[in-house]
Amino acid sequence: MRRRSFLQAFPALGVLLSGSKSRAGEPDRSSSGQGLLLTTWGFGLEANEVAWKTLRSGGSALDAIEQGIRHCELDPAERSVGLGGRPDRDGIVTLDACIMDHLGNAGSVCAMQGIATPISVARAVMEKTPHIMLAGAGARQFAIEQGFQVQDLLVEDSRREWQDWLKDARYRPIANIENHDTIGMLGLDADGHLAGGCSTSGMAFKLHGRVGDSPIIGAGLYVDGAVGACTATGHGEEVMRTVGAFRVVQGMSLGLSPQAACERAVEAIANFFQRRGKDWSDTQIGFIAVNKQGDVGAYALRSGFNYALKTESREGLLPADSLLG
């Protein structure tokens, strides 16, 4: 679907999509000498607080990302990240995560069982192996060899949700509820170095073995220390289809602001839906991005996506603008 046709289909969006400015019309330059943190969803507020302590103590953006995401992974009250994540349709919790630094070093695990902190395993893959991704039983074996403890990740609340789902065993995604709970975090430290991480237990009640965009470098996360960083949340298949996070960073490398780059990526996903004639009424996609200068951006397919921002002078949970309102 060409851009003109898309704008004809959604005429109210013409002004929004024709420019490259942020919501306020100017770059949202929110960084300071201490750094910046940008994290998806409401749990990003608490994750940012934990990560900020690492930055304030002189830790790198990579260290902060790991600590912030680990905090979320270890919270059994979170239904789709780490311990407490919702299981697949067979009642098995499988976890995905990746991490990436400003030099392009990256590590990832996917479909891993029994290890509550996949973000730390992903970092171990990055630093202690010649590989980027380990999967399934191999990822679990590696984690055990590195001293990670095996535990049952299916907490009682998630078990009850799964048992209720089994009554009719139909998957009905709901935008902003069932598909969204990926934690994606971006950081800029006092040295000007970027890093990012992403972690999830994936779609609730997915087919066993399903892996989304979260552990895939270029889809759920991409960092180029000379340009910027981006992470995604929402329907992973659509983010993979468009190589979403890389698309956003590439846009920044071509001169777009983080806001404009996020908007273009969401527009591309919408175009793909239109061209394929797919029902997207229950689908949500969201991107957050930051460039090397500390400008930030966030944009979603539809309303309901929010993100947590933390700097030395500013913090809070902010609503992202959206394509469809």
Image (cartoon, helix red, strand yellow):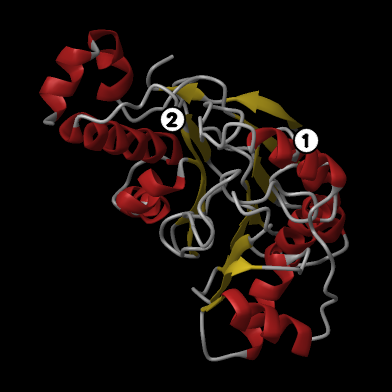
The residue at which mark 2 appears reads as 283
Camera-side residue of 64 and 35: 64
> Would you identify the image quadrant in which residue 44 lies?
top right
Mark 2 is surrounded, within 10 Å at the Cα level, by few (under 14), some (14 to 19) or many (20 or more) other residues, namely some
Q: How far is mark 1 from mark 2, CA to CA? A: 34 Å
Lateral position of residue 3 relative to residue 137, left or right? left
Residue 45 visible to an observer of this rendering: yes
The relative height of residue 133 versus residue 46 in the rendered view (above or below) is below
Lateral position of residue 147 relative to residue 284, left or right? right
Q: Amino acid at mark 1?
A: Ser
**Element type where label 2 sits in the image:** loop
Identify the mark at residue 287; answer none if there is no mark. Answer: none
> Which residue occupies 64% across, 38% down?
166
Residue 246: x %, y % from top left: 38, 56
Give the total of numbered labels. Answer: 2
> Which residue occupies 83% across, 63% down?
152
Q: Earlier in the sequence, mark 1 or mark 2?
A: 2
The relative height of residue 255 versus residue 148 in the rendered view (above or below) is above
> Would you identify the image quadrant in which residue 110 lies?
bottom right
> Which residue occupies 27% across, 38% down?
268
Locate the N terminus by quadrant: top left
Residue 255: x %, y % from top left: 32, 47
> Which residue occupies 69% across, 59% down?
189
The relative height of residue 14 versus residue 275 in the rendered view (above or below) is above
The residue at which mark 1 appears reads as 313
Residue 78 visible to an observer of this rendering: no
Q: Amino acid at mark 2?
A: Thr
Lateral position of residue 149 relative to residue 117, left or right? right
Camera-side residue of 43 and 209: 209
Residue 174: x %, y % from top left: 53, 26
Question: Are circles 1 and 2 on residues that touch, CB within 8 Å?
Answer: no
Mark 1 is surrounded, within 10 Å at the Cα level, by few (under 14), some (14 to 19) or many (20 or more) other residues, namely few
